[in-house]
Amino acid sequence: MPTLTDLRSERIKKLESLQKKGVNPYPPTVRRSHTTNEARGHSDQAVDVVGRIMSIRGHGKIQFIDIQDESGKIQVVCKKDVLPEKEYSIIDDIDVGDFLSVTGVVGTTSAGEISVFATGMIVVHKSLRPIPDSWYGLKDTEERYRKRYLDMIINPKVKKVLDARWKIERAIRMFLWNEGYSEVETPILQPLYGGTNAKPFTTHMNALDSDFYLRVAPELYLKRLMVGGYERVFEIARNFRNEGIDLTHQPEFTMMEFYEAYADYHRIMDLTESLIRFASHEANGGYSIKVGEHDIDLSGSWKRITVDEAVQTYLGIDWNTISDEEVKTLLEKHKVDVVGSWSKNKALFALYDHEVTGKLIEPTWVIDYPQEVSPLAKEHRSKEGRVERFEGYIGGKEICDGWSEIVSGLEQRKRFESEQKNMKAGDKDAHPLDEEFLTALEYGCPPLGGIGIGIDRLVMFLTNTWAIREVIPFPTLRMEHENHKESIALNNKPIQRDSSESALSLMENDQGSISYETVKTIVSDMTKNTGLQKHMMAVECIMRSLARHFKEDENLWGMTGLIHDADYEMFKEDPKKHPSKIFEVLKAHHAPQSMVNAIYSHAWGWREDLPEPKTKMEWALFGCDELSGLITACALVRPDKKIEQVELSSVMKKWKVPSFAAGVDRHHSEIASEKLGMTLDDFVQLALDAMKKEHERLGL
């Protein structure tokens, strides 16, 4: 098989051949009368089209060439008796990836395909490297992002998402301009970072011999503009936070913030609802979107509840009457930490953030937060210890954050000083004290409201794309020579994994994405046994519940559970080959590496070459794969065969009878529960509850 070097050398020879024929393969300009899409509507008319060659086929006196531009693709028909001899001869020297300019008449072939029947053509760029095959694509997900330009060429979905991003950014500008806002710019290099609680990047400016920070948020400079007399401003700003990388966070990202004088948080919420509706309509043509597996309607007004009401509704906690000791017990139960100095308000907010937010499915504003967790928000007009802050949630995910702004220099100083105490108590993300900003406020600032909306996050919402790197044209990556690449071998060869690898390092390399619809299609195509299908659906239910429990990506881990045994039926005669085939399929679809890792390691213990699970969710799949079978067996031995009537005690009773569901390896679930930091009873109860909730879907 030729190497890339061989292929490049062959193309250079073709380049030289073109030049010998008097062809300039890199002309300074070229005529184009129509895009390929426009040409389709000009039957029987002469056109000049230009595009990248995507395929070449045919032989002898007729050749068919597909060319593609930004608008689409069209077939070119090249006939030897029509084209000048010199121009027909260049077909010998062109390849997929070259750019071709074609003059001809639009018509329809005998097969019914609209085509340009060429009367002339020239090469306008000779490419020296081959484009990866459109089915197998780039060799791994890291390569997809590193060579993003190739990803765009061979994967139409990539460009579709990015097109939506540009439409959304344009819609934001159009909406705010129409509301009388001025689009402004503020510094990226700042002598003191501020505007949110975050860890900054630091750099050194040689000209001033001073250290500077990359902007973590534009807020404090936008407010300086308000002091200076502007009344409505917004900025779509590149921000930088020296923090973790995962499916929803990148160190370099885009944030839009806007501020309006004489407005409060109610006005800002109203305006934001309208803005998001407008952006949805511009990007999708309507107000119905999917967030994960949830169908969301953006056409109406959003529900508004206080954070106290949210905790009461979803956790049964009365914020005002619960004691400190009861809160500490709940923190321990839910494994929630409070960063920095402890207070009941901060602790309850941490519980809310960990346990409640994922349950806010319909568009919801949660308002009136504790002052301790909102250093820049204005004190509430009627609730002591609270601020006029709001956060927006859709589909269980946060989409934006804003508040009525503090405009008193004295009040803002108190908040900053409180943040300094938090910093000393260990909160590394606490907000620094910005004297210059305080001075600006003391010159006078009108009442105002504001909000910050992550553009990347908004695009993820409006395209239902839950991997942030998919919505960024060029995401942040390690330098290539430092890349850690896992060696996952097929055909029963050992899989090498760094024993020190952590969940964080996996997430840093977790760059792929795959849709739920794609996963369902793969499962349907590869699995015909209904019992196996129901088993995978049961594991999906449990994995979703475990993901919610551990604050992981519910959709990702639900899909992992659903597809984990998709190739099992293919290897009835040689089950030790499972899960090799599903690995190939997932790689072809650019699935996240964490999904692939979990599916491989779930078979640890019965196939000696597979790695031991490392991360929490890998252990979750390893354990619930077996556990779902035992719970199903407990339901099926009941006279009514209904899982709704199965209790924890009956499952645990059967647990101790090895002959019952003898094919279920209880030891897997016992190890997993220990690795997950759960008692076996809690692990089984969680799985049982998850399957009961979906009993109709599971047919139990």
Image (tube, rainbow, N blue to C red):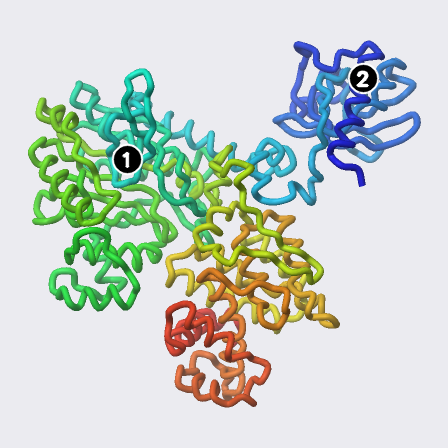
Q: Residues within 10 Å of mark 2 (few under 14, many from 20)?
A: some
In this view, the mark in front (2 or 1): 2
Q: Quadrant of the N terminus?
A: top right
* Residue 329 appears left or right of 569: left
* Residue 75 visible (yes or no): no
Mark pair 2, 1: CA separation: 61 Å
Residue toward you, 441 or 446? 441
Q: Residue at x 30, y 65 (%)?
A: 334
Q: Estimate the x, y position of residue 673 in percent, counting from the top left.
A: 42, 72
Residue that label 1 marks? 271
At mark 2, the secondary structure is helix
* Residue 598 appears left or right of 300: right
* Residue 4 visible (yes or no): yes
Q: In this rendering, is residue 347 above or below 217?
A: below
Q: In this rendering, is residue 89 above or below 497?
A: above
Residue type highlighted by circle 1:
Leu
Q: Residue at x 55, y 37 (%)?
A: 480
Residue that label 2 marks? 16
Q: Estimate the x, y position of residue 324 in percent, counting from the top left.
A: 14, 64
Q: Which comes before the other along the chain, label 2 or label 1?
A: 2
Residue toward you, 473 or 287? 473
Instruction: Please identify the quarter of the rendering in which residue 13 is found.
Output: top right
Q: In this rendering, is residue 115 above or below 575?
A: above
